[in-house]
Image (cartoon, rainbow, N blue to C red):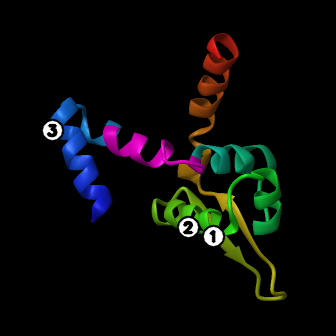
């Protein structure tokens, strides 16, 4: 609910396309871009491996962000019947962020 209120306020203030605004509400949330980048580079990963790749993100926050990205159908939580193994990977929707992330890399290489 809080996110919808923030999105509405931003839409009213900026008059941007609602889809564009929503996209930045997802990708601009702290740690989400790094989670997506780690999964793009490494494929399926266990929670502990994602956590070690993003050292400054607490386990609690990482868990929240993964759940939010699952809700957005960007990340999928994979469970395996033959073992207690659980890992995370990008959905097709998440994989389609690859050119976006490459563009961010190119921009940051040039300007940061």
The mark that comes first in sequence, 3 or 2, is: 3
The residues tagged by marks 2 and 1 sit, at their Cα atoms, a distance apart of 6 Å
Disc number at residue 60? 1
The secondary structure making up most of the magenta span is helix
Query: Dot 2: within a 10 Å radius of its alpha carbon, few (fewer than 14), some, or many (20 or more) residues?
Result: few
Examine the structure image and report whether residue 39 is included in the region drawn in magenta: no
Q: Could you tell me if residue 41 is visible in this image?
A: yes
Give the extent of the magenta segment: 21-32
Image height of 18 relative to 35, above or below? above
Relative vertical location of residue 79 with respect to residue 38 in this rendering, above or below:
below
| Residue 84 image point, x, y percent | 81, 86
Q: Quadrant of residue 23?
A: top left
Image x and y of residue 27, in percent: 49, 44
Helix, strand or loop under label 2: helix
Residue 64 has which mark? 2
Q: What SS does tag 3 mark?
A: helix
Residue occupied by mark 3: 12
What distance separates the C-alpha of mark 3 from that of mark 2? 28 Å
Task: Indicate the quadrant containing the C terminus: top left, top right, bottom left or bottom right.
Answer: top right
Looking at the image, residue 47 sits to the left or right of residue 94; the answer is right
Spot the residue most to the top.
Answer: 110
Q: Is mark 2 in CB contact (under 8 Å) with mark 1? A: yes
Q: Is residue 44 above or below residue 34?
A: below
> How many marks can you see?
3
């Amino acid at each position: 609910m809080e996110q919808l209120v923030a999105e509405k306020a931003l839409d009213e203030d900026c008059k941007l396309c609602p889809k564009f605004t929503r996209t930045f509400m997802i990708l601009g949330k702290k740690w989400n871009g790094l989670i997506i980048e780690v999964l793009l580079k490494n494929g399926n990963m266990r929670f502990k491996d994602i956590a070690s790749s993003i050292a400054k993100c607490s386990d609690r926050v990482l868990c929240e962000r993964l759940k939010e990205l699952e809700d957005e159908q960007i990340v999928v939580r994979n469970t395996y019947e033959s073992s207690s193994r659980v890992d995370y990977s990008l959905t097709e929707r998440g994989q389609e962020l690859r050119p976006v992330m490459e563009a961010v890399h190119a921009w940051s290489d040039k300007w940061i």
